[in-house]
Image (spheres, helix red, strand yellow):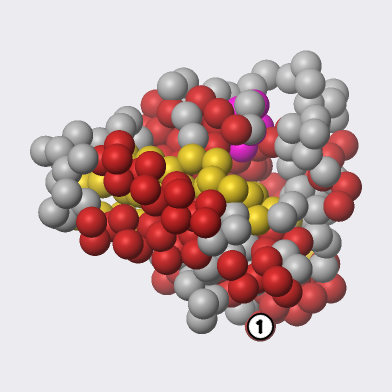
Amino acid sequence: MKIVNDIQALRQQVKAWRMQDLKIAFVPTMGNLHEGHLALVKAAHQHADKVIVSIFVNPMQFGLSEDIDNYPKTLEQDKNRLIAEDTDLLFIPTSDIIYPKGYTDNTFVEVPNISNLYCGKSRPGHFRGVATVVCKLFNLVHPDVACFGSKDYQQLQIIQTMVDDLSMPVKIVPVEIIREDSGLAMSSRNGYLTAQEREIAPSLYKTISWLAQEIKTNKNFSELCQQAGEKINQAGLTTDYISICHAYTLAAANEDDKNMVILASAFCGKARLIDNIVVNL
Ligand code: AMP
């Protein structure tokens, strides 16, 4: 696995592969890699000849009150995991390389409406930071394909919308959520959970699984969401939001919708967990 930190070396390698007519797949991450990330790398191999992974903890997507300095870093372990998955190139830029002029005054990409809902409401500016860095990384890597996890469902829809709206020549490949045996969606943020919190964290998934069954027969969505929120709170978490949405626009679903997604987020101690289930009737 080739490891590069600077843009010139990255561009050189990408150009060499392009001259050989090789297809490139890209997996952007913030590191602290787990099976969820590795599933993206496996999917990437199925779509291209060469796989590039980036590890960059993007300051632009963290709010002022969010502790970027304590974001878990496990670089040596990440490298070994990526080598085991036959990753061809790992790009690890610093913030100065991605944002040479800083990130508060730069040109940005913002996908309207959808960015202000759900997680965007709880984390103002978050999706602007995500869309901007993904756009920049696409401009550096020029991938044919990029893999994103369905775990971050709203992020996936935002990236797909950005690619469509700005005619970016990249195919977005969604990858299924990888869960722990308890049902808890794998996440770097699970590392913040205490042993006791780990016991109750799976109640988020349990509750949205219950909701996914209920909506097949009960069309009173707002009442169902309220009940689901109460179940999550009773389990010892604090519900941030729970919503039954149209699968693509993410607008509140109505009773005639056939393709829906349940989006949910809850605080469990210091960690803010997110999860979702797609429901196709
Ligand atoms: P992150 O490092 O948290 O920015 O995540 C990088 C990529 O991994 C994103 O596309 C996430 O959606 C994806 N990802 C994170 N956790 C999971 C998971 N449990 N299952 C599938 N994909 C995941």
Q: Residue at x 38, y 42 (%)?
A: 226
Identify which residue, 1 or 93, lies in the foreground. Answer: 93
Residue nearest the observer in this picture, 226 or 132: 226
241 vs 39: above or below = above
Q: Is residue 51 magenta?
A: no
Furthest residue in direction front, as rendered: 234
Q: Which residues are magenta?
A: 125-130
Circle 1: is it few (<14), some (14-19), or many (20+) Cα within 10 Å? few
Visible in this render: residue 68? yes
Camera-side residue of 46 and 68: 68
Residue 150 shows in this picture: no
Q: Callout 1, which amino acid?
A: Ala
Identified at 46% across, 21% down, the residue is 112
Q: Is residue 90 left or right of residue 234?
A: right
Provide the major secondary structure of the magenta segment. helix
Residue 90 at x, y percent in the picture: 72, 62
**Which residue position holds label 1?**
84
The residue at 85%/24% (across/down) is 101
Residue at 45% across / 55% down in the picture? 231
Query: Which quadrant is home to the N terminus?
Result: bottom right
Q: In the image, is residue 126 part of the stretch drawn in magenta?
A: yes
Q: Is residue 240 left or right of residue 243?
A: right
Under circle 1, the secondary element is helix
